[in-house]
Structure formats: structure tokens, C-alpha cells
Image (spheres, rainbow, N blue to C red):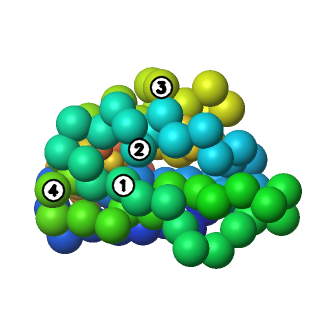
């Protein structure tokens, strides 16, 4: 589903590469300009976003908010960690 591009900053994005239509909204509206188009094409022939600057991604999910096709979403790494800890705790019960 995703190229799961984990970042080194505070956020990460997940992209459903084959759903993307290459409209560039996510790239245009990302506040810190963390996204760029891929060099590769998806199977529909579109470039899709990649997290070119993971160090500036905040996980704000504005990219997900603006994507008309639900092809991308951003997450805060601390939220991911909380979910991971909750899953580990649930599995241990
Ligand atoms: S989560 Fe926010 S900062 Fe990260 S790529 Fe998406 S819009 Fe940009
Ligand atoms: S907004 Fe959605 S459809 Fe448009 S380029 Fe970004 S991921 Fe692809």
C-alpha cells in the first residue's frame, strides 16, 4: 500500500503509490516543503510524492488533509510510538 517513508524528524508520511494521481496538492501545501515528486512513475503513469526532507516533516498531516484521493497521510512519530506501546501492552495482557 505504501512506500512507508519514515523520517528522521518529528513526522513520517505513508503514500499509497498506486492511488496517487500526481496532482501535487500535498507537495504544494506542505508547510516545511518536505515533499517532492518521485522520479519513478506509478502504474497509472503519475509521479507520486516522496519525503525528500524527512528532517523537516512535523507529521502535521496537512498533506493528507489536502489529498483528494486519500493517497497520503502524515503521522507524528511520538503518536506512532504511543500506539506501538499500547499494542505491546495489549499483547502482553
Ligand atoms: S505531515 Fe505535514 S510536514 Fe510532513 S509531509 Fe505532510 S504536510 Fe508536510
Ligand atoms: S495530493 Fe494525493 S493525489 Fe495529489 S500528488 Fe499528493 S498523494 Fe498524489
The x, y position of residue 86, in whole percent, is 32, 49
Crowding near the residue tagged with mark 3, few <14, some 14–19, many ≥20 C-alpha atoms within 10 Å: some
- Whole-Å distance between the Cαs marked 4 and 2? 13 Å
The residue to which callout 4 is attached is 56
Marks 4 and 2, the one that precedes in the sequence:
2
Marks 3 and 4, the one that precedes in the sequence:
4
The x, y position of residue 73, in whole percent, is 46, 42
- Whole-Å distance between the Cαs marked 4 and 1? 10 Å
Of residue 25 and residue 6, the one placed in the foreground of this image is 25
Mark 3: C-beta under 8 Å from nearest atom of ligand 2: yes
The residue to which callout 3 is attached is 66
- The label nearer to you, 2 versus 3, is 2
- Whole-Å distance between the Cαs marked 2 and 3? 10 Å
- Whole-Å distance between the Cαs marked 3 and 4? 19 Å
Mark 1: C-beta under 8 Å from nearest atom of ligand 1: yes
**What number is the disc on residue 27?**
2
Amino acid at each position: 500500500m505504501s512506500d512507508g517513508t519514515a523520517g528522521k524528524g518529528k513526522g513520517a508520511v505513508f503514500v499509497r503509490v498506486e492511488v496517487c494521481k500526481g496532482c501535487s496538492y500535498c507537495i504544494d501545501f506542505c508547510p516545511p516543503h518536505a515533499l517532492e515528486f518521485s522520479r519513478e512513475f506509478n502504474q497509472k503513469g503519475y509521479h507520486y510524492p516522496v519525503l525528500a526532507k524527512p528532517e523537516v516533516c512535523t507529521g502535521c498531516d496537512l498533506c493528507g488533509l489536502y489529498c483528494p484521493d486519500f493517497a497520503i497521510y502524515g503521522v507524528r512519530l511520538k503518536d506512532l510510538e504511543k500506539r506501538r506501546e499500547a499494542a505491546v501492552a495489549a499483547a502482553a495482557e
